[in-house]
Amino acid sequence: MQVTVLGSSSFFPSLRRSWTSLFLNLGGGDAVLVDAGSWRLMTFRADILHTNRVYITHNHPDHTGFIGALVRRMRRQNRTRPLTIFCPTDTVQRLHHFIRIFNHNKIPLFVQIHPFTPDIPRTIDHLSSSQTEVKAAAACHTTLTAAYAFCQGDKRIIISPDTGPRCPTLLTLARGANAWFHDCTFATGRLLSIRKGHSTPQNAGGDAARANVKALILIHISGLRLRNPRAIVAAARLHFNGEIYIAKDGMSFNF
């Protein structure tokens, strides 16, 4: 399983960091996207056009804004294979809006949207070619938000780019995982992060330790907060002794 970061920024992007999106090559011909905020979906990586699944975490534009551009690229290649988009129930209207903007005010026939209500961890999808089970759970954010787990045998990757700390459903979902892509929106300010439904490096490190994951990958972080990346890693290290990385656009991880 390979995870490539297409966008790693919070709501305030930079030239080097676009809004959130991750591309997962699961093997066996299965490739999926988590979130569609990155403008790189307009021009980056032709293999993304072959994906059959998109898993959207929530309705904020930094996670949905370029789904329409992706659909347009697929439509221009005369795509007929279904593109299945999983999303929380209150995200459907936002997806329709962005898809219509880029596609002559229409939803192409190959687009199939499957809304669900994230709650306790449960299986929402199964990709047979790669033998991947996809689970979802509710994250602790300011709107209805899902986190996703991609499971292959005893291998499990967790993706939760927007969440506050100590989220019970996420700790259950992530327990013992190989890696957790965890929100790190705020460099400091524990109370502010909780109120905004986000996390600091200390929060992320604490969650990783509680869930006993092997690696922590900090994502959804503004370039303005990366002037001292060593301090960010050191803050997470106060609570977590495993591997720690700061996600960057274009970075790939193999599991």
Image (spheres, rainbow, N blue to C red):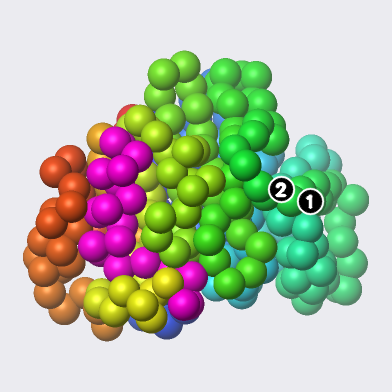
Instruction: Give how far across and how far down residue 34 sits, in percent.
Output: 55, 50
Q: Which mark is residue 249?
A: none
In the rendered image, which quarter is residue 139 located in?
Answer: bottom right
Of residues 81 and 179, which is closer to you in this image?
179
> Looking at the image, can residue 49 be seen?
no
Q: Residue at x 78, y 58 (%)?
A: 89
Callout 2, which amino acid? Answer: Phe
Where's the N terminus, which quadrant? Answer: top left
Residue under numbered circle 1: 115
In the rendered image, the vertical position of residue 92 relative to residue 191, given as above or below: above
Q: Residue at x 80, y 40 (%)?
A: 82
Where's the C terminus, which quadrant? Answer: top left
Give left or right: position of 6 versus 101. left
Label 1 crowding class (10 Å Cα cut-off): few <14, some 14-19, many 20+?
some
Q: Residue at x 25, y 75 (%)?
A: 187
Instruction: Give how far across and how far down residue 71 sits, in percent.
Output: 72, 58
Q: Are marks 1 and 2 in contact (CB under 8 Å)?
A: yes
Magenta portion: prevailing SS class: helix
In the rendered image, which quarter is residue 188 located in?
Answer: bottom left
Q: Residue at x 79, y 38 (%)?
A: 81
Callout 1, which amino acid? Answer: Pro
In the rendered image, which quarter is residue 220 located in?
Answer: bottom left
How far apart marks 1 and 2 lie (CA) works out to 6 Å
Residue under numbered circle 2: 86
Of residues 253 and 225, which is closer to you in this image?
225
Label 2 crowding class (10 Å Cα cut-off): few <14, some 14-19, many 20+?
many
Q: Could you tell me which secondary element the residue under label 1 belongs to? A: strand
